[in-house]
């Protein structure tokens, strides 16, 4: 018997997140209700929390956030109820550990009809807009339109919570079109960047370089396969990469820091005809010299958004141990400590991936 009420964190605006008792969702046809076992706090969650214009708008654009809403898009949960037809539609049953892809497509727009569902024109994304509350709660509902994947029972929920970010990392690496022998630089050794390092290692580049301001994160990058780690606080990383490549520059540069300086850094250290992958959700617009992209270097600029078609791969990599996410998870907190979790991610000093575990809540 499911309870009528549940604990949940509700976002009302920048710096206004509250732990409340709200109704447990009811399921309709094709829908899935899960008991959330773990949900990550993403850097984009912190940007939303601190009032970034992308989420709350400014004079140039409308914000993406739509409060009140339960945040959280890096979740896994145990199926506790299925609407009519949901078991057949999603190929799952009560008791399964499952994940839903971050985007909930419309399945009717031009992009969805072409199989490009991750660019859906009229999509929802968990944790930012009201139709699809996220996983900072004891229970959450997957709509009938959701893309749901079953997770092997032997995978602990705290590891499974890394499936969504790892899928995004894998997609970014695929966008880099890495070839044997390439010199690859991944800027940013947070959760996403570390996933990219682990995935890029499997592409067998000639030299895999991780760049970050935090030496502890760089140590984890080495554990996950980086050949060389560079800290811009300690050396001129642009010159170092040029020196390592006879002055040409790296073949592939993947930006995963969320900081504008990393974009400029990449444009200066990448070789002519190189491939630049931009992944980050930036807090504010970034200004760079676009002449470098065209007239100077004729670069291939590839964006990377979400983790389309990569969830099954991420699940297999984690389940098989080909990518070990253990060193990435640094904190596991009960739901009541969401504020402490946000501050841990915001400072980024002692944390990498911070998880909330609603099932371990106190009280």
Image: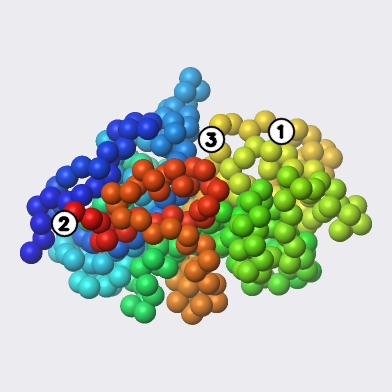
Q: Quadrant of the C terminus?
A: bottom left
Q: Nearer the viewer, residue 86 or 152?
A: 152
Looking at the image, residue 3 sits to the left or right of residue 278; the answer is left
Residue drawn at 39 percent across, 46 percent down? 340
Please tell me the numbered disc located at residue 288.
Answer: 1
**Which of 77 and 229 lies nearest the eye of the viewer?**
229
Q: Secondary structure at mark 1?
A: loop
| Of pointers 2 and 1, the one earlier in the residue sequence | 2
Q: Residues within 10 Å of mark 2 (few under 14, many from 20)?
A: some
Q: Residue at x 64, y 51 (%)?
A: 214
Expressed as whole percent of the image width and height from the top left, the position of residue 180 reads 75, 70
The residue shown at (82%, 38%) is: 295
Distance (Cα) linking label 2 and label 3: 36 Å
Horizontally, residue 149 falls left or right of residue 252, namely left
Can residue 330 be seen from the camera position used here? yes
The numbered disc on residue 335 is none
Residue sitting at 56 percent across and 31 percent down?
Answer: 284
**Mark 2 / mark 3, whichever is N-terminal:** 2
From the image, which quarter does the N terminus lie in?
A: bottom left
For label 2, the SS is loop
Q: Position of residue 281 (x, y in %)?
A: 53, 42
Going by the image, does 350 lie left or right of 4? right
Q: Residue furthest right?
A: 246
Read off the residue under disc 2. 27
Quadrant hosting residue 200: bottom right
Q: Position of residue 99 (x, y in %)?
A: 35, 63
**Circles 3 and 1: CB atoms closer than 8 Å:** no
Q: CA distance from mark 3 to mark 1?
A: 15 Å
Q: Which residue is mark 3?
A: 283
Crowding at label 1, few (<14), some or many (≥20) Cα neighbours within 10 Å? few
């Amino acid at each position: 018997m499911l309870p009528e009420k549940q604990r949940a964190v509700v976002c009302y605006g920048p710096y206004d997140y509250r732990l409340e008792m709200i109704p447990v969702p009811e399921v309709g046809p094709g829908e899935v209700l899960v008991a959330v076992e773990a949900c990550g706090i993403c850097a984009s969650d912190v940007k939303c929390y601190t009032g970034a214009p992308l989420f709350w708008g400014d004079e140039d654009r409308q914000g993406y956030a739509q409060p009140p809403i339960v945040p959280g898009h890096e979740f896994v949960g145990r199926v506790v109820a299925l609407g009519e037809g949901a078991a057949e539609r999603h190929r799952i049953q009560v008791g399964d550990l499952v994940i839903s892809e971050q985007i909930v497509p419309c399945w009717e727009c031009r992009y969805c009809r072409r199989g490009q569902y991750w660019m859906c024109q009229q999509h929802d994304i968990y944790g930012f807009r009201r139709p699809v509350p996220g996983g900072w709660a004891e229970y959450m509902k997957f709509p009938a339109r959701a893309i749901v994947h079953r997770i092997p029972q032997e995978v602990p929920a705290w590891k499974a919570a890394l499936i969504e970010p790892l899928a995004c990392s894998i997609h970014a690496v695929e966008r880099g079109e890495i070839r044997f022998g390439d010199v690859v630089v991944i800027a940013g050794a947070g959760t996403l960047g570390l996933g990219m390092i682990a995935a890029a290692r499997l592409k067998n580049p000639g030299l895999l370089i991780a760049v970050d301001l935090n030496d502890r994160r760089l140590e984890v990058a080495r554990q996950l396969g980086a050949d060389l780690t560079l800290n811009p606080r300690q050396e001129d990383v642009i010159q170092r990469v040029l020196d390592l490549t006879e002055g040409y520059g790296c073949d592939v540069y993947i930006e995963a820091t969320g900081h504008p300086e990393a974009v400029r850094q990449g444009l200066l250290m990448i070789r002519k005809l190189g491939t630049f992958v931009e992944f980050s959700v930036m807090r504010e617009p970034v200004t760079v010299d676009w002449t470098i992209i065209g007239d100077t270097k004729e670069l291939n600029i590839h964006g990377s958004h979400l983790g389309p078609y990569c969830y099954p791969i991420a699940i297999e990599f984690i389940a098989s141990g080909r990518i070990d996410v253990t060193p990435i998870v640094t904190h596991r907190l009960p739901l009541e400590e969401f504020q402490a979790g946000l501050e841990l991610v915001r400072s980024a000093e002692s944390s990498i991936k911070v998880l909330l575990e609603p099932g371990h809540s106190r009280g």
